[in-house]
Image (cartoon, helix red, strand yellow):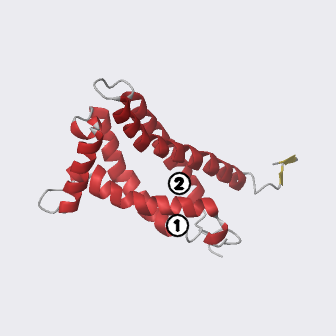
Amino acid sequence: MTATQHPQPRPLSARKLDILYLVFFVIHIPIMLLIDLGPFIPSAIRPQLSHTLREYHIQTSKDRFFTDPPAWFTMYMYLEAIYHVPLSAWMTWAIPNDHIMVPLNLLIFALETAVTTLTCVVEMGSWDGYTAEQMNGLYALYLPYLALAALIGVDAYTRVRKQILGGGQTIKGKTT
């Protein structure tokens, strides 16, 4: 056993939520690179697929975050570039390897993602000029991401708490 593994490494097949998280992070990487962060990639090296997907998103959703982003949303995109991309890449390795730091990193990711996504959802609620169908389409893009962040947050908090308190063992006369 190494310091980065659980005392008894668990097979991925026994960790259903970890499978969900792994699938999410694997999908999250190309979405970030091809759609969300497209403007940060110089046009000369940006794949045509990125232009096409981003344009499709804008045309179908009329997402103002992509056509006229507020300053805070641009900052969120930088956060995505410097935090989400490397963390997502690490998670694609760490989750299958049952790395002991996965729960803590999931907790931080979940909190940051929930706050930034909730900000976007609240902002979208103030947008004028959208039909109910268009707003429902936008909410259908953002709310599942918020729900996943909440699920990850609750699960990660439980895992971190268990790690800190010794896995349910008696600590200082208290049973966890």
Q: Nearer the viewer, residue 100 or 114?
A: 114
Q: Name the one closer to the observer, 137 or 143.
A: 137
Towards the viewer: 7 or 17: 17
Tally of numbered discs: 2
Q: Are marks 2 and 1 in contact (CB under 8 Å)?
A: yes
List x then y, in percent, for residue 59.
23, 43
As drawn, the residue found furthest toward the bottom would be 1
Q: Residue at x 39, y 52 (%)?
A: 83
Name the amino acid type tagged 1: Ala
Q: Secondary structure at mark 1?
A: helix
Q: Which label is found at residue 30?
A: none
For image coordinates 67% across by 68% down, the residue present is 14
Q: Earlier in the sequence, mark 2 or mark 1?
A: 1
Q: Which residue is mark 2?
A: 105
Horizontal side, residue 44 vs residue 107: left or right: left
- Label 1 belongs to which residue? 94
